[in-house]
Image: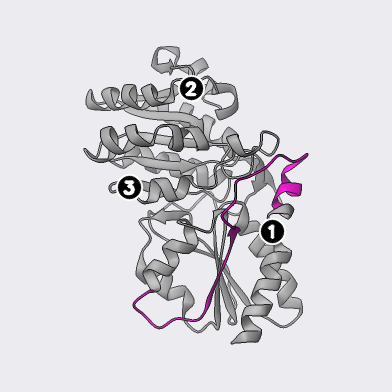
Amino acid sequence: MEMASLREAYGKALVELGAQNKNIVALDADLSKSTRTALFQEAYPERFFEISIAEQNMIGVAVGLALTGKIPFVNSFAVFATGRTYDQIRQSACIANINIKICGSSSGLSDFGDGATHQSLEDVALMRVLPNMTVLVPVDAVETKKMVEFAVRHNGPVYLRINRNDLPVYTDESTEFELGKLYQMRDGEDAVVFANGVMVSKAMEAAEILEKEGTGVRVVNVSTVKPLKKDEVLKYIKGVKGIVTAEEHSIIGGLGSAIVELLRDVDHPPVEFIGVKDRFGTSASNYEELLEYFGLTSKSITLTIKDLLDRC
């Protein structure tokens, strides 16, 4: 499949939208080459603010800019953009529903070489719990661009989670991103996998393997984690015998938790989570090695579905 960089798509989208809307500004914390806001800095130096390694202050500056009518995009690695700045996001941005956009780059385990200090396995949980916050996890570069376009139109805080590595492209460029809509990637009658980010491609691989064995797996891209619409989830669990959630995040507080929270008051098939099991990350020589170590693979999804269906 075609592979493309989500970071590059994000940076180019900011530049393109910046030409159309002079109120768009970008802030970075000494990582602009990695987050790709360097592209925006080159195009519009007067609208780029290098805050240096002062992420908490960066949120405060962004809130101030938003109060003057600007649309600030705040950028850092996901672990710093959400963890180091949590109090400022909560107190200054979310309580007052301020119009800032936070891009957590190098999310999940995708910064494979730098270990636990630079890997964000709790960022979705942190952002999802905040009232007024929208949480988006793009599946590929095309959806990343569409989400940036949405973020500009949307009034209120948005968290956008960006993978560091190139990922397969699944999204049709002609379709428009709809907040809260779930996207079926393939159909199947036996089990459904709700996945996002890199785990969509792993779920697609697992579905192909199981199809050859006579098991039909429905794969659904949940790129909007919040707001998650109950009717959308119910639509895709209809008729299946088992549900699996797959995310590059802790199994606590992320996509799996969001799905089960919606299903708590309705009859539903059994659910299994695939994610990182209450651990911090670690260093590895490459990204795939790290995904294998934490069980975030098509093999894990395949075995989980088989076990789940055997128990049904």
Residue 235 lies, in percent from the top left, at: 43, 75
Q: CA distance from mark 1 to mark 3?
A: 29 Å
Q: Residue at label 2?
A: 29
Task: Confirm whether the magenta stretch covers residue 280.
Answer: yes
Q: CA distance from mark 2 to mark 1?
A: 32 Å
Q: Residue at label 1?
A: 295
- Nearest the eye: 150 or 110: 110
Residue at x-position 67% and y-position 79% = 307
- Nearest the eye: 231 or 141: 231
> Are the residues tagged 2 and 3 within 8 Å (C-beta)?
no
Of the residues shown, which amino acid type is indicated by label 2?
Ala
Image height of 139 relative to 183, above or below: above
> Are the residues tagged 1 and 3 within 8 Å (C-beta)?
no
Of the residues shown, which amino acid type is indicated by label 3?
Leu
Image-based side of 99 in relation to 125, left or right: left
Residue at far top of view = 46
Tag 3 or tag 1, which sits nearer the N-term?
Answer: 3
